[in-house]
Image (tube, rainbow, N blue to C red):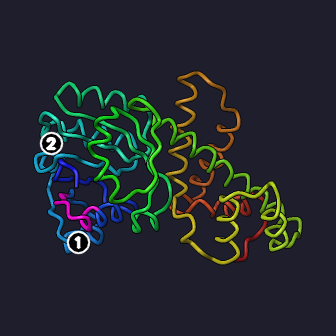
Amino acid sequence: MSDLQRVGLIGIGLMGHGIGKNILRHGYPLTILAHRNRKPIESLLEKGATEAVSPRAVAEQADVVILCVTGSPQVEAVVLGEDGLLEGMRDGLVIADCSTAEPASTVMVADKVQARGGRFVDIPMVRTPTEAEAGTLALMTGGDPATLAEIRPVLECFADTFIHAGEVGAAHKLKLINNFIGLGTAAVAAEAIVAAIKGGVDLQGLRDLVTAGGSNSVMFERVMKNLLEADDSVFQFAIRNAQKDLRYYTTMTQQQPATSFIAEAVHQTYVMADNLGFGEKFVPYLVDMLARVNATEVKR
């Protein structure tokens, strides 16, 4: 166990539930933030968690607080807002942000936390809710190495892979780059699959050919498995969240500045999917959206 015995967790969603479950399984006292979605909250309460009514109250009952919220606006609200973590801040408190966030916002929030005597690290994650439940997520880490080493036993409750990216904000940059590659590949795969459907190409033949050669990827296989086997578990990531991550990426490249022609096209693909009502669907349903745009039909 870490010397930081008490853990707080804000964001009990698809990923946060597994994180919280595994923290409790390793014997850490866990305080979670109340949320309107009661099912995962009640599950963790049954396992021994304590519920707090505000981020400030979470901070007051924890030595390290893990954030697992949607993005930068939510992180800023939880940390800097009324009754936020900053209002419950004391010297040495660690805030570890698992969210996918804008690096510039991450640095700004970290500076404000440090000014109040706290510590802030970014620890965005990859893999899926399945790995969150199993305690085998992969984390990119950014921030003070000594702080990261101090909280490592807590992080090892729910992750088995750690990649240090550099100073605060660097892990969020790495996460955005990784997400662009993955989400871009999924968009390319969806577009190609729809061309195959409209052209009358056998989809199992397409799958067999691609998976046997250099064009294969994890994302292609996930999209095809979702389509041909109606398996929603393989890629549980909403199109609206993907759109947000891609916007963060293009904002980051603009600020650097670095060209991102392909990323802009990929981002707009996800924007179109959201506009057409697919925002809450998982990423493989880009196939269905592009089929509609191309006046063809997907048979699942």
Quadrant in the picture for the C terminus: bottom right
Is residue 269 on the magenta stretch?
A: no
Q: Position of residue 242 (x, y in %)?
A: 54, 50
Disc 1 residue type (three-letter): Glu
Packing grade of label 2 (10 A; few <14, some 14-19, many >=20) is some
Q: Mark 2 to mark 1: distance in Å?
A: 23 Å
Q: Secondary structure at mark 2?
A: loop
Quadrant in the picture for the N terminus: bottom left
Is residue 28 on the magenta stretch?
A: yes
Magenta residues span 23-31
Q: In the rendered image, which residue does mark 1 sit on? A: 42
**Vertical arrangement, residue 247 with respect to residue 61, above or below:** above
Please name whichever residue, 23 or 210, is drawn nearer the observer in this view of the structure. 23
Which residue is found at the position 69% from the left and 64% from the top? Answer: 221
Which residue is found at the position 57% from the left and 34% from the top? Answer: 250
Which residue is found at the position 44% from the left and 45% from the top? Answer: 100
**Does 68 sit left or right of 49 as displayed?**
right
Please name whichever residue, 161 or 225, is drawn nearer the observer in this view of the structure. 161
Q: Position of residue 224 (x, y in %)?
A: 70, 68
N-term mark: 2 or 1: 1
Any mark on residue 50, and which?
none
Any mark on residue 83, and which?
2
**Does 100 sit left or right of 259 as displayed?**
left
Please name whichever residue, 249 or 142, is drawn nearer the observer in this view of the structure. 142
Quarter residue 186 falls in: bottom right
Which residue is found at the position 35% from the left and 55% from the top? Answer: 156
Q: Secondary structure at mark 1?
A: helix
Q: Position of residue 288 (x, y in %)?
A: 68, 65
